[in-house]
Amino acid sequence: MTLQQLNYAIAVAEARSFNKASELLYISQPSLSASIQELEKELGFPVFFRSGRGVTLTPEGSDFLLHARLVNSQYQDLLDYLGKTKDRKKKFSVSTQHYSFADKAFVEMVKEYDTSRYEFAIMETKTKDVISDVATLKSEIGILYLSDFNRSALLKLIRSAGLTFHHLIDCEAYVYLWKGHPLAKKKSIRFEDLAPYPCLAFDQGDATSFYYAEEILSTEEYTRIIKTNDRATMLNLMVGLDGYTLCSGIICEELNGSDYAAVPFESDSVAQNSVMEIGFLTKDKVPLSDIGQNYIEKIREYLGIRDTRQET
């Protein structure tokens, strides 16, 4: 097994395609396939499931890739220490549910670095992918929320993936809609008020579990629902269809614009206002980098949270 083979396996996993990975690695597809096959033969198990749609990791391959990333990262750190990779960009990546505060903190963090020397990435993605990305070290940090409804199920997944959930802030739920919506000027909104309007929900892909939903209620409880996977599209649908979504109420007007409002969600006999506990995921036994610590500090600053770790 060679470091080159580890790099090849990481590239294929990220590209989800031998063809795409070979282009990124500047080698032929047959050479890449032969190298991975040789690696799998040495390991004694297949790293990838192969199909006409591309490749996915096998369960054994997922575990292997985690260790491959760790070894590759440690090797690159050693090269940095020895001064062998002066031109290599340092990488930092975040995976998050759809939160504008996560984007805002990312913007403020990136401003402090020379982007010609760093490779930054932030991915607004599905709940399951947030967990998976941090588990495989594709991202150093994941941002998501827990509630009374999903806490037990998600914490089980988080712990089984070797991750830790760190609390940031508790939020009451708000109804997020555009300011021209018929309900926008109400002091609070009950679930029954929302019946004539479509709930806009972020699509969770093939995941059928209700626990992955970013909305505080089960999707079965909404009378009308429209799914999207893009925050900008969701904002357009709010205007075009008088849609709404239930969120934390933490809205960044600088990024989302000032055409939208967050109205307190009022509990009733049908739907109880569930507290949203927003936090971040890290990989167990993998300390945050200086950039990662800076990013979390930027989130704390934006949310107005004191870092209790610094208190005596």
Image (spheres, rainbow, N blue to C red):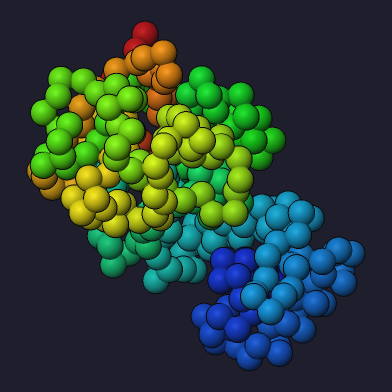
Q: Nearer the viewer, residue 90 or 62?
A: 62
| Residue ID at (64%, 75%) | 53
Q: Nearer the viewer, residue 301 or 123?
A: 123
Vertical position of residue 73 compared to residue 278: above or below: below
Is residue 250 in sight in this rendering? no
Which quadrant holds the N terminus?
bottom right
Quarter of the image where one finds residue 113: bottom left
Seen as rendered, the residue at the extreme top is 312
- In the displayed structure image, the side of residue 145 where residue 240 appears, left or right: left
User: At which x and y percent is residue 92?
Assistant: 42, 54
Label tally: 0
User: At which x and y percent is residue 223?
Assistant: 41, 37
Vertical position of residue 220 compared to residue 42: above or below: above
- In the displayed structure image, the side of residue 245 where residue 156 appears, left or right: right
| Residue ID at (41%, 51%) | 227
User: At which x and y percent is residue 138?
Assistant: 53, 55
User: At which x and y percent is residue 91?
Assistant: 43, 58
Is residue 311 in sight in this rendering? yes
- In the displayed structure image, the side of residue 180 where residue 81 appears, left or right: right
Which quadrant holds the C terminus?
top left
| Residue ID at (86%, 63%) | 45
Q: Nearer the viewer, residue 112 or 276?
A: 276
- In the displayed structure image, the side of residue 138 where residue 197 appears, left or right: left
| Residue ID at (55%, 28%) | 150
Q: Nearer the viewer, residue 246 or 75?
A: 246
Vertical position of residue 191 compared to residue 132: above or below: above
Seen as rendered, the residue at the extreme front is 196
